[in-house]
Image: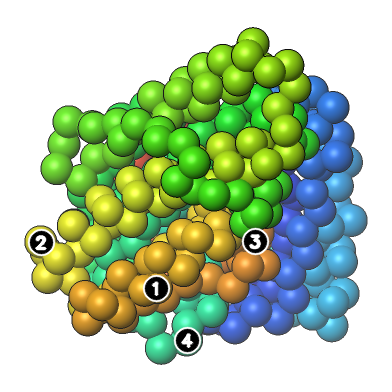
Amino acid sequence: MRILAIESSCDETAAAVTEERRVISSVVVSQIAEHAVYGGVVPEIASRMHAESIIPVVKKALSDAGMGASDIDAVAVTYAPGLIGALLVGVNFAKGMSLALGKPLIPVHHIRSHIASNYISSPELEPPFLCLVASGGHSHIVLVSDYTSFEVIGRTVDDAAGECFDKSARILGLPYPGGVHLDKLADSGNADAYDLPFPHAGGKYDMSFSGLKTAVINLVHNEQQKRGELSETMRADIAAALRKRVCDMLVGSTLRAASDIGARQVAVAGGVSANSELRRRLSEECAAAGMRFYLPELSLCGDNAAMVGVQAYYEYKSGHTAGSDLNAYATMQIEKDYEGSRG
Ligand code: KG4
Ligand code: ZN
């Protein structure tokens, strides 16, 4: 089954052609440069840029696959969660394509698709497994009991891990989005130079990142008041100390949950899964605990449509298709299957 998949939930316009778990083509056009001057994603600009890019991006995905629209068996699209105006561009485009081609329309939850990026990188991976999903908007520990059956057993009680990285990076003078730059800067720092707090969240596997972000902001302001501008060494040390604490939280909660439920397989997904220390520590700690660890290749960690197409294949097999009344939703629990009309 050849699926044309579309993703426009935030600041990447993406289209892909997939067949089951195989990626035939994948095109991602990033809007990062446009948003960087504002220090964050501007929703109004994101929607307009998706509207401009969506036709060329879909055309390129089809031509890279050596296919025409009539070679496609179904159209899939991210319908939730995300920026509502951004999602609506993809959803309406996908509805139009599905109607014009007379092919099924498959709505895909954004976090479900991030998890599915692992099916591309690890063809042998099958549920059940425990997946840490950490992105700019989410930090969830998800029990994936089947391809379309999910349960969130731990979550952040405040900011997402990516948000904590991005806000801290900003105060350290790094460009937006700062996660990747902070990761690089941290490589040359001493993580023990500063003792950042370890915030405690209520639930057993819950996490908290906003106290860490505030601690970094206060630390930077204090150092600036004492010494003027921060030295390069100090910035690197703060980046390393923060990266360590964020990983302590993500890895600690994930491994605790995995061992309590007796998980034999653990995976990671979402933009923050590109973090070098997170990848290394999860891989080491899962190996030490006798659990198999899966991670997406770097090009699949951020938003893309290949992961949407692969998850869509499983949604279709479970009968989760949509009619022409498909809408977009800014928030949506990962547990909920699409419940609109099927007509
Ligand atoms: O999944 P994603 O592309 O978009 C959302 O669905 O939110 O995640 C983006 C997030 C941003 O916060 C970005 O800074 C973070 O992923 N990120 C990283 C790294 N690369 C991207 N955070 C830490 N280390 C990285 N190497
Ligand atoms: Zn994402």
Q: Which residue is nearer to you in this view: 28 or 131?
A: 131
The residue that label 2 is drawn on is: 260
Say left or right for 315 vs 137: left
Distance from label 4 to label 2 (Cα)? 27 Å
Q: Are marks 4 and 2 in contact (CB under 8 Å)?
A: no
Closer mark to the observer between disc 1 and disc 2: 1
Q: Are marks 1 and 4 in contact (CB under 8 Å)?
A: no
Q: Label 2 neighbourhood size at 10 Å, few (<14), some (14-19), many (20+)?
A: few
Q: Along the polypeptide, which appears first: circle 2 or circle 3? A: 2
Q: Say if 283 sits above or below 136 in the image.
A: below
The residue that label 1 is drawn on is: 283
Q: Along the polypeptide, which appears first: circle 3 or circle 4? A: 4
Q: Along the polypeptide, which appears first: circle 1 or circle 2? A: 2
Distance from label 1 to label 4 (Cα)? 18 Å
Q: Label 1 neighbourhood size at 10 Å, few (<14), some (14-19), many (20+)?
A: many
Q: Along the polypeptide, which appears first: circle 4 or circle 2? A: 4
Q: Position of residue 49 (x, y in %)?
A: 83, 37
Label annotation for residue 123: 4
Q: Position of residue 148 (x, y in %)?
A: 33, 63
Q: Is mark 3 within 8 Å of ligand 2?
A: no
